Image (cartoon, grey):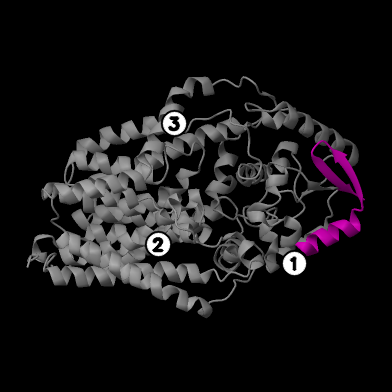
Amino acid sequence: MIAIDVRRWPEVWTALGACVGAAASAAVAPLTRGWFHVPTGGVGIVTVAGYPKAYDYAVIALLIVGSAAGAFVGSRWSGGLQPAGSLKVGGLKATAPRSFSWLAAAVVFVLMLFVHDHPYAVLEPFHEGEHLTPGFLFRSGARPYGDVFVLHGLGVDGGLDALVLGDPPSPRRVRRLQTLLDAATLALLVPIAAELSTTAVGAAAAVFVGLCMIAAGQIPLFPWFRLAPLLLAALGMLRYVRWRSLSSLALAFVASTLGVLWSLDTGLYALAATVIVCFLLRARIALPVAVVALLLPFALLLIVHADIHRFLVDSFVIIPRSIDAIWSRPALREISWESARYYLPPVFFGWMLVVAWRRGDWRIAIVAIFSIIAFRTAAGRCSWSHTRYGLPLFGVAAVAFALEPLLLARRRVAAAILAIGLFVFVEVAPNVAAASRFLAGWRARQSHAGLVSYPLATGRGIYTTRENAADLAGLNGFLDAAAPPGAPILDVTNERALYYLLQRRPPTRCSDVAMLSAPPLLAEAMRQLEANPPACVIVEGMKELDQYDGVPNRIRVPALFAWIDARYPHRARVGRYLVATR
């Protein structure tokens, strides 16, 4: 008989326990589906399909709990990872040298700057319109929240645009600023990795894997800068538990509270995680710091003359009640690498919670708490890019808490297996290949060969296709004849950049057609349309934009389209656009 000494491999048994516990949770999870209902408050793919979205969140919670329970049993059975009695709040082991942080952060910043610099990419009218149109309206005197509905956050939904669009306006200025902010945000992974890793080599590997996990090399245009509040807050809390520095605690709270205005979801994630960590730390000094930090966003709202009442109602009542119904998607069910990248991180988070307690290491606990809360985005949208967006700390943690300790303990076989798994899981090869192409093609991207100038002054500095230019020129000419100067127009095609490009104001506070399926916003919009009807309505444009998630806008907001059909019976075709008039 072969005797197996389980005490020789405590890390392996803890990981196996986490996997077994998660598997048990996955087996039980389908039994709970009947407990949940289809979300209300709007119309989207989950409501059309009759899908109980809360079930997806329950599955993620069960995976985390099952993983933690299994890891706990595995660690106790192996006798490894002896409990430290309490988590340490100071005197943690030395990490990578500080000089590494500055140098590596500079390298990451420069590399990401060149990878993500695409100044002449053809404008995407939905996503870029989400910030260009509010920016134009803010520069025209519109009050944030009072006159313009803000979904993602004041900073990312037009605030930055209002600062840099210029006169005459140019979207290229906004793109350049976002590229700088993206690079700076991704460079924040470096000081975070330095706080978590034991060696400079380990920290460098953690940053590299972290960037690959969030597809920083694969996705050329993505608002990574929205993650800044979360990463800054995590960095602040990591430094606070090491040095008990008041400035680090202030960084965490200020980044979180102002982050709510920067990007609503990541700001709230950062604030929730910071509060939870401070509560567990029993950090009494956190209370006055939090109170002062909470005053800052309101001070900023007063400075920009925002409607504070509408900010509170929109951000903390309407959006939370409606966002799942409108924009969430059912979780992946097929067996694939993509579903693995969705379901395995929660298992890792549960394992981290147990390892943090057993090792007595607050750093692991902090990263686990921030990661679990940030995964809300991945669990909500369940798409390729959003899954990666919801895992900003996963790659760094996998190297710092699993791979590097195995290597330092000379567990070479286990380390090799984990390294190979990570190589495939975080898509190292696709990231390196794509980033290499972007770096090699940077100079070529500084040319707009093959594109033409926009026929509108608002397209200054960017270029488009001949077909799009002809369509926009025709639409602008039609509106000049059909709509008096300054008269509002209504777009229900999801080409939200049209308001900016044509310099026409929408007649409603909320110009996001999908969000108008939320009853409070629809009722408000119908009142505004009756009081200030648009000169005409653009009812058809890019076909692919009118059916996000396969749900046409006419199905999302039938009452609005019925109103349009009744009051604007005539149709005129202008290029790809179909315009409804009286």
Compared to residue 541, the image places residue 335 above or below, namely below
Give the tally of numbered discs. 3
What span is in magenta? 557-582
Kindly identify which residue carries mark 3.
115
Compared to residue 326, the image places residue 406 above or below, namely above
Is the residue under label 3 in contact with that under label 2 (CB below 8 Å)? no
Q: Which of marks 2 and 1 is in front?
A: 2
Mark drawn on residue 123: none
Q: Residue 355's x, y, as percent?
A: 21, 63
N-terminal label among 3 and 1: 3
Element on which disc 3 rests: helix
Q: Residue 408's x, y, as percent?
A: 12, 47
Q: Which of 147 and 434 is in front in this view?
A: 434
Q: Judge the density around disc 1: few (<14), some (14-19), many (≥20) Cα neighbours within 10 Å.
A: some
The residue under label 3 is which amino acid type? Val
Say whether residue 480 is magenta: no
Mark 2 and mark 1: Cα distance apart in space: 33 Å
Kindly identify which residue carries mark 1.
523
